Amino acid sequence: MRKQVGSFIRQTFDRRGRRWVLSSAASLYSLYSRRGWTTIYTQDGLWVHHCPDGYIVERYVNFSATLALYETKTIRDWCVFYQPSEGDVIIDVGAGIGTEATYFSRGLGKSGLLLSIEAHPKTFEALSLFCQLNRLENVQCVRTAIHDSESDVLIDNPSSHVGSSIVGSSTGILVPGATLDRLVREYNLERIDFIKMNIEGAEKAALNGMRETLSITRQVCISCHDFKADRTGNEAFRSKAYVESYLIDSGFELQVREPDPRPWIRDQVNARNTKWHRA
């Protein structure tokens, strides 16, 4: 029932000339869905949600998200084998709108660094504004697509921030591309404690451009998308076996998490560098 009400409000008022009504209605509805007052307004074409615990920035109105929910999901989905510590360095490849940023940022402390990388222009705007409003001062946002060469790539343009992909895209938005090795050199990183990657099937290309980076990385968590290959028939999304083999060849030991019915977790690859030592 709650989702149906939220969907009705969004579909009815999320259009030019009615968004002021949507802002008011959504703010009132937040008392019910979030159990706390949330002020919702538009800024630069994005929806900003000022929740009791901070800010959420989306490309559409979100009736239920809070920073607390973001952090719970981050711990559950990404941090089974790694937890951020003071002074750590994390690279988030495919950072989206910053869902994981607050948990990572707080754990790293003032002496740590989170490099949040997002390719889609509008999603990147949401990520940047999210970090600005929540005052995540140890986060650097980078707009680029991580792959195996220094060249522009096409990324598709879904209405949501979820699912943007450079895999098999013949139309869409042209975005700058780079190897992770180049970015690591550019930021003068001598070690990386954790790499989280969620780039919708482009994992193979990303790995082929980060051999040097892996040699100084302690822990990785890579979301593979074989389930998309199974669902769509597009074999370009199938990457798990390749990712596992590549990591083993790079000196990593695979780590197996508890069985999970969610396909995006089932296809996740966790691994630790057996040769890693703190610089």
Image (tube, rainbow, N blue to C red):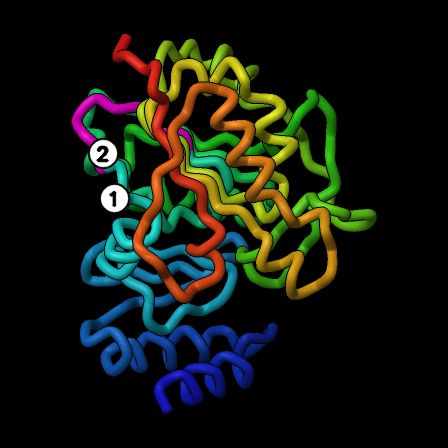
* Quadrant of the drawing holding the N terminus: bottom left
Up-down relation of residue 4 to residue 53 (above or below): below
Among the 4 quarters of the image, the one containing residue 28 = bottom left
User: Secondary structure beneath disc 1?
Assistant: helix
Q: Earlier in the sequence, mark 1 or mark 2?
A: 2
Q: Which residue is mark 2?
A: 84
Looking at the rendered structure, the kind of residue marked 1 is Tyr
Up-down relation of residue 217 to residue 22 (above or below): above
Crowding around mark 1 (Cα neighbors within 10 Å: few <14, some 14 to 19, many 20+) is many
Among the 4 quarters of the image, the one containing residue 134 = top left
Q: Residue at x 47, y 39 (%)?
A: 197
Front disc: 1 or 2:
2
Q: Which residue is mark 1?
A: 103
273 lies left or right of 168: left
Q: Percent x, y for residue 169?
A: 77, 48
Examine the structure image and report whether residue 87 is included in the region drawn in magenta. yes
Q: Residue at x 28, y 79 (%)?
A: 33
Looking at the rendered structure, the kind of residue marked 2 is Pro
| Highlighted range, magenta | 83-91
Q: Percent x, y for residue 73?
A: 30, 56
Looking at the image, do the residues carrying marks 1 and 2 touch, with CB atoms under 8 Å apart?
Answer: yes
Q: Percent x, y for residue 20?
A: 46, 74
Crowding around mark 2 (Cα neighbors within 10 Å: few <14, some 14 to 19, many 20+) is some
Quick one: 16 or 8, which is closer to the camera?
A: 8
Quick one: 204 or 61, which is closer to the camera?
A: 204
Residue, far bottom: 1
